[in-house]
Amino acid sequence: MGGDRDWHDWHRDYADPGSALARRLRVVQGHIGAWLDERPEPGLTVVSMCAGQGHDLLEVLAARPDAARVRATLIEFDGRNVAAARARAAAAGLDGVTVREADAGDLAAYREAVPADLVLMAGVLGNIDDAGVRRTVATLPSLCAPGATVIWTRTRRAPDLTPAIREWLGEAGFAELAFTAPGGVLFAVGAHRFTGTPEPLPAEGRIFRFR
């Protein structure tokens, strides 16, 4: 993971309910909650790329009486964020959550975690180059179970890549469920359902590198 940003301190904006980050979080969590309501069966699997401290998924699961039916793998590179996410999951009694300290850009990180019924890409696509975004979208059929949902975020700062991302998702076999782009902020949140055919996970390879 490149760049000079402190990805642990970055989470501080979640504490301000009026921040763009907190607003984006609420949209993502709304989609996660809706997905859980639509999928009442047991044995659901989730994988979260670059999961940070797991605020999006863990806060939703902690508030639900049916959290035990979910098996989730959170993939995060920063050791401090890994520790925070593990502590959050343990405090909430989320025994089905594994927080894996690994590089989410490396396909090896997904072994035994996919195919997943829900793939979370919050804060991922805005921190990799355009080629990496396209490669990540093209890799999703190797991460998804039949009928899986993908929830993703991306800034709309110029040049806005979100129209291309939506097109690439369609080409990869995904149908759009929702696209939220609020006024006054630059973030966008998308939710897509996989309607294509799952593909095998390559034994090795790199999807992206953080900038």
Image (cartoon, grey):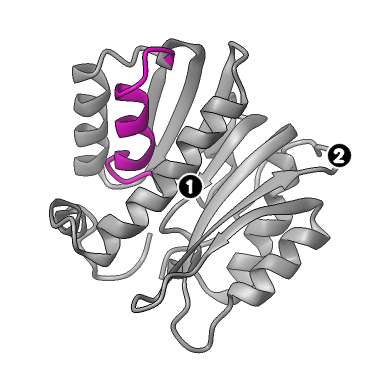
Report the quarter where the C terminus lies.
bottom left
Q: Is residue 146 above or below residue 68?
A: below
Q: Earlier in the sequence, mark 2 or mark 1?
A: 1
* Crowd band around label 2 with a 10 angstrom C-alpha radius: few (<14), some (14–19), many (20+): few
| Residue 13 or residue 85, whichever sits in front | 13
Numbered mark located on residue 197 in the image: 2
Mark 1 nearby-residue class (10 Å; few <14, some 14–19, many ≥20):
many
Identify the residue at horizontal 24%, vertical 67% (top origin). Answer: 5
The residue to which callout 1 is attached is 104
Q: Which residues are magenta?
A: 51-66
- Give how far across and how far down residue 147 sits, in percent: 75, 34
Which quadrant: the N terminus?
bottom left
Identify the residue shown where x is 24% and y is 70%: 4
Q: Is residue 59 magenta?
A: yes
Helix, strand or loop under label 1? loop
The reply to whether residue 102 is in sight is no
Q: Nearer the viewer, residue 72 or 26?
A: 26
Q: Would residue 163 appear left or right of 146 to someone viewing this image?
A: left
Instruction: Where is residue 51? Give x, y as percent.
Output: 38, 44
- In this rendering, the answer to whether 148 lies above or below 172 is above
